[in-house]
Image (spheres, rainbow, N blue to C red):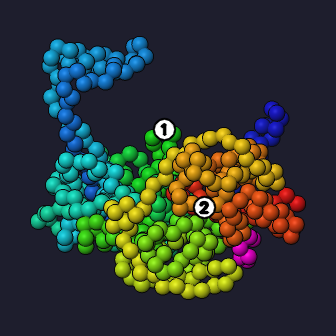
Amino acid sequence: MKRRISLLIGIATALAFTGVLSHASPVAAQAVTTADRPPGFEDLAEKLVPTVVNVSTTMKLEAPAKGELPPMPDLPPGSPFEEFFKDFYDQYQNGKPPSEEKESSLGSGFVVDAANGYIVTNNHVIKDAEEIKVILNDNTSLDATLIGTDEKTDIALLKVKTAKPLTAAAWGGSDKARVGSWILAIGNPFGLGGTVTAGIVSARHRDINAGPYDEFLQTDASINRGNSGGPMFNMNGEVVGINTAIFSPSGGSVGIGFAVPSNLAKGVIEQLIKYGKTKRGWLGVRIQEVTPEIAESLGLEKPAGALVAGVTPKGPAEKAGIKSGDVILKFDGRVINEMRELPKLVAEAEVGKKSTLTLRRKGKEQTVSVDLGQLEKAEETGMIAGKKEEKKSEIKSTAVESIGLSLAALNDQLRDTYKIPKTANGVLITEVKKDGIAAEKGIAPGDVIVEIDQQEVTTPEQAADRIAAAEKAKRASVLLFIARKDDMRFVALKLKK
């Protein structure tokens, strides 16, 4: 090892002697610091920082009445909070409850309309706020009015009045933000003033289970606490996203941040300006992904589109003649490559507008017209129902070993035991083998098989015969249409060779 190190030192010395490693040349140093360095963001940042604001909120916390305090928290001995809680509880016991306090929350936002004073931020920044204040980049503090919110995309719209001229940010197209594209994330956290971080678009179309329209842009630019609601800019100085969330075990930035894409946010904001709330299109279908097994069962060349698992009674889809088992391939001429694309396209469509759907039904394509409803009205009237919890019950049943299920014919007693609605008809699944094919697909006791390969079944024997016929025909999979309480879905089970 010593010899190797000495050899390296000798080589370095020789190179320095010959001038190869010389640091004496000022021309070479100048070339490294100017011509060869990456371009900076100075001019762009200077132009964009004035569009970004700090958003601060206050919320009253009413002190509970005496005797209504929760139990003293179990804190480790010596904890700095132990003395705090002790003093707090002692005040109540002595009949001196603390006065009302106010809790502050800080985030960021940006101006989208300078003339009318409209400012965009995240809904979670201003949620339950009693007062909202906006601090401009020059430290001017303004009272803000909440115009509208949208929890589904975590967006809120504020309005301020001021004689001072505001600087508005321009919208850009998030669809043009490619993976690897440079971006600037600007916020105004904690009232410190404009804070700029740079990074790239790490990924697109991220679903982080934050809402039904998740399509986040992912970035490695630092997005810390207080930056929520701030804009993400492209190198043209256009907003391509609203910085909304981070993934972090510690609460600080670890290089995984998420922004609502501008193409999604812009439409929501336009509706909030116009109506004070959102008005989304509603089709009235329950859909699921077309897996390779389902595609094979339906005779599709590849997995694509959105499979209709259920249709809301008296909803737009039912009125248009759409049925369970249909695969929606296009919406208003736009191809549906993945299931999650359909809800977004429907939501962005105009309420009451007649839309055109291209369907595949039993091997044939057809086109239908649908008069879209309004999602918010369907939610208010209860047309969109939630799921209920399941309960298990053990009964004697017939086993279908090849797919790992035990089946029974439906009767009034079983309907009552498993809470199965009278509208659901088919064969009851009473047992699922833990290591079987059906268990892998999430099938559970209490589910009802309504159809097998798009043909109705009413008895366990009929169901077993259909499965046996598929195996005899050397089919790769069999398609089940399953009813689970108020939900319906298709499940493709691979058959043993």
Q: Position of residue 81 (x, y in %)?
A: 34, 21
Q: Say if 27 sits above or below 320 in the image.
A: above
Q: Secondary structure at mark 2?
A: loop
Q: Position of residue 458 (x, y in %)?
A: 68, 62
Q: Say if 273 sits above or below 230 in the image.
A: below
Q: Position of residue 118 (x, y in %)?
A: 23, 66
* Residue at x-position 17% and y-position 68%: 165
Along the viewing direction, whichever of 48 and 98 lies nearer the viewer: 98
Q: Residues within 10 Å of mark 1 (few under 14, many from 20)?
A: few
Q: Residues within 10 Å of mark 2 (few under 14, many from 20)?
A: some
User: What label sits on residue 425 in the rendered view?
Assistant: 2
Along the viewing direction, whichever of 32 and 328 lies nearer the viewer: 328
In which quadrant will I find the N terminus? top right
* Residue at x-position 82% and y-position 67%: 470
On the question of residue 185 being in view, the answer is no
* Residue at x-position 26% and y-position 62%: 148
**What residue would you read off at disc 1?**
250
Residue 372 lies in what quarter of the image?
bottom left
What residue span does the magenta drawing correspond to?
296-301
Q: Position of residue 326 (x, y in %)?
A: 60, 75
Q: Amino acid at mark 2?
A: Asn
| Residue 130 lies in the magenta stretch | no
Find the residue positioned furthest to the left.
Answer: 163
* Residue at x-position 60% and y-position 41%: 392
Q: Amino acid at mark 1?
A: Ser
